[in-house]
C-alpha cells in the first residue's frame, strides 16, 4: 500500500518549455489523499515547482510540494515517462 496525494489533471503545456502544469486537489481546505495498492501505481512523477519572479523564502525541499500552488510535471526524466506522458 502507498499513501498518495492527488493532483489535478494536466493543464495545457506551457508555451515556453512544453511542461504540463498540475495543482493539488483540495477539498475542505485539505489536499485529497488516499491509500492505494502498489499494483495501481504505474510510475512516480517528477514535479518541478512553478517559480514566479521571486521564490518565497519559506519554501524548502521538505515543504515545497505543500506550499507551491502549482507544479510542472517533468516528462523528460527518462524515455519511458516521455513516451507515456506525451
Image: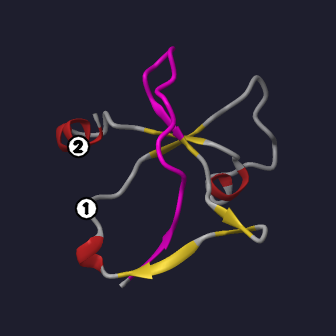
Residue 12 on image: x %, y %: 49, 29
Mark 2 and mark 1 in contact (Cβ < 8 Å)? Answer: yes
Count neighbours of disc 1 (C-alpha within 10 A) and say few if under 14, some if 14 to 19, many if 20 or more.
few
Q: How is the image coloured?
A: secondary structure
Specify the label residue 26 is tagged with: none
Residue occupying the point 30% across, 39% down: 77
Residue 32 on image: x %, y %: 61, 70
Residue pointed to by mark 1: 42
| Residue 57 magenta-highlighted | no
Residue occupying the point 51% across, 14% down: 16
Residue pointed to by mark 2: 84
Residue 43 on image: x %, y %: 28, 58
Task: Give the left or right position of residue 86, taking residue 11 as reference.
Answer: left
Q: Quadrant of the N terminus?
A: bottom left
Number of numbered tags placed on the structure image: 2
Which secondary structure dominates the residues rendered in magenta?
A: loop
Q: Quadrant of the C terminus?
A: top left
Residue occupying the point 77% across, 71% down: 28
| Quarter of the image where one finds residue 40 | bottom left
Label 1: which secondary element:
loop
Q: Which residues are magenta?
A: 2-21
Residue 66 on image: x %, y %: 68, 58
| Mark 1 or 2, nearer chain start | 1
| Residue 13 magenta-highlighted | yes
Residue occupying the point 64% across, 43% down: 70
- Tell me if residue 33 comes above or below residue 75 in the rendering: below
Task: Give the left or right position of residue 36, taking residue 63 as reference.
Answer: left
Count neighbours of disc 2 (C-alpha within 10 A) and say few if under 14, some if 14 to 19, many if 20 or more.
few
Amino acid at each position: 500500500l502507498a499513501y498518495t496525494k492527488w493532483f489535478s489533471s494536466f493543464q495545457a503545456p506551457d508555451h515556453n518549455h512544453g511542461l504540463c502544469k498540475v495543482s493539488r486537489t483540495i477539498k475542505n481546505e485539505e489536499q485529497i489523499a488516499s491509500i492505494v495498492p502498489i499494483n495501481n501505481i504505474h510510475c512516480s512523477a517528477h514535479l518541478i515547482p512553478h517559480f514566479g519572479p521571486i521564490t518565497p523564502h519559506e519554501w524548502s525541499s521538505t515543504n515545497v510540494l505543500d506550499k507551491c500552488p502549482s507544479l510542472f510535471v517533468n516528462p523528460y526524466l527518462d524515455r519511458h515517462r516521455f513516451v507515456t506522458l506525451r
